[in-house]
Image: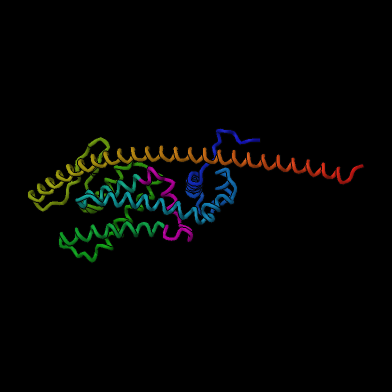
């Protein structure tokens, strides 16, 4: 039987992405040890050698999945830390982690598991360490400007990132309260400390409906409070401008992605047509060879009759 036309043969790149997507789901559900090559292949409806051909084994595909998730999360955190004000950096970083958890739950489940040795640096601990190293630089600058010892920045960075990461692990399953409310309380604790907690904190950068007032700091006087409020108002304006820029960039990226997808589809179609032509040529060659062999066999039979008449 011939294969139905609707089941188009995947290209190598398409098959690789399919295997990565399937493996990502299985690793999130069952972990590395609970997932087998047989299960990956069966879910993808391919043979085990196809998986080995693309990744060399289960360790290979697991390493690719972990690396992609780490790069995605690190990229989001790094972008969040590009804000100008320390408070805005903290708010965006907390929101970035929670957004990643919300949008990539499977990936986060893979990262927080006890990673298999095959994943190399793909453990959650090493991920936290990489993020903390970036936060360390931010804290060092803040400490120096406020008269604190910058040498303490690495320790505080681990405390801060660890608090946010563990909260993210807890929120992965409970999902209550909402993302922005959790981020607001995280920032409230980190920014104000236990002795200065605001009873009704809210995110200043991107509230769900723009409600709530920003948490007020412990001020030594009205002048300091007014200066802080002016600085916050300035930050709000800058944050809104940044948000608009990000929206424009996201739209441009979406357009580029659509164009790239169209280009890849055209290339895939050309490749399919090329393969079909090559297959047709091969079939024609085989038919010619078969006809030639038939003629030779017929000629040999006639010669046989001449040489050995009855």
Residue 186: percent from the left, percent from the top?
Answer: 28, 49
Coloring scheme of the render?
A: rainbow
The quarter of the rendered structure image containing the C terminus is top right
Outermost residue, right side: 310
Q: Residue at x 51, y 56 (%)?
A: 59
User: Per the image, is 116 magenta?
Assistant: yes
Query: In this image, 300 relative to 286: left or right?
Result: right
User: In this rendering, is residue 5 above or below 15?
Assistant: above
Query: How many tags in the picture?
Result: 0
Q: Quadrant of residue 147 in the image? A: bottom left
Residue 220: percent from the left, percent from the top?
Answer: 10, 53
Outermost residue, front side: 306
Residue 175: percent from the left, percent from the top?
Answer: 37, 42
Q: Quadrant of residue 130 in the image? A: bottom left
Residue 270: percent from the left, percent from the top?
Answer: 48, 39
Q: Is residue 232 visible?
A: yes
Query: In this image, 305 relative to 48: left or right?
Result: right
Q: Is residue 200 visible?
A: no
Dominant SS in magenta: helix
The quarter of the rendered structure image containing the N terminus is top right
Q: Nearer the viewer, residue 110 or 10?
A: 10
In the image, the segment drawn in magenta is 100-122
Q: Residue at x 30, y 39 (%)?
A: 252
User: Per the image, is 39 magenta?
Assistant: no
């Amino acid at each position: 039987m011939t294969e139905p036309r609707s089941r188009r043969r995947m290209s190598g790149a398409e098959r690789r992405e399919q295997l990565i997507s399937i493996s990502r789901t299985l690793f999130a559900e069952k972990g590395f040890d609970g997932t087998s090559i047989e299960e990956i292949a069966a879910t993808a409806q391919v043979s085990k050698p196809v998986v080995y051909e693309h990744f060399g084994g289960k360790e290979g595909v697991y390493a690719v999945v972990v690396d992609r998730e780490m790069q995605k999360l690190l990229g989001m955190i790094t972008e969040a830390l590009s804000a100008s004000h320390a408070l805005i950096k903290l708010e965006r970083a907390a929101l970035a982690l929670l957004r990643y958890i919300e949008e990539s739950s499977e990936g986060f489940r893979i990262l927080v598991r006890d990673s298999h040795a095959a994943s190399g640096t793909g453990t959650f601990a090493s991920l936290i360490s990489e993020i903390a190293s970036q936060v360390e630089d931010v804290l060092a600058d803040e400490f120096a400007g406020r008269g604190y010892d910058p040498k303490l920045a690495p320790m505080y960075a681990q405390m801060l990132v660890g608090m946010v990461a563990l909260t993210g692990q807890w929120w992965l399953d409970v999902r209550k309260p909402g993302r922005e409310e959790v981020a607001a309380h995280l920032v409230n604790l980190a920014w104000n400390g236990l002795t200065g907690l605001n009873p009704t904190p809210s995110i200043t950068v991107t509230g769900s409906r723009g409600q709530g007032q920003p948490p007020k700091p412990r001020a030594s006087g009205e002048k300091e409070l007014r200066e802080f409020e002016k600085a916050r108002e300035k930050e709000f304006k800058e944050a809104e401008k940044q948000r608009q820029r990000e929206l424009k960039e996201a739209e441009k990226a979406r357009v580029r992605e659509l164009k790239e997808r169209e280009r890849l589809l055209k290339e895939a179609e050309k490749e399919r047509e090329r393969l079909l032509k090559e297959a047709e040529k091969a079939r024609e060659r085989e038919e010619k060879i078969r006809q030639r062999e038939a003629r030779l066999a017929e000629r040999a039979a006639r010669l046989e009759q001449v040489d050995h008449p009855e």
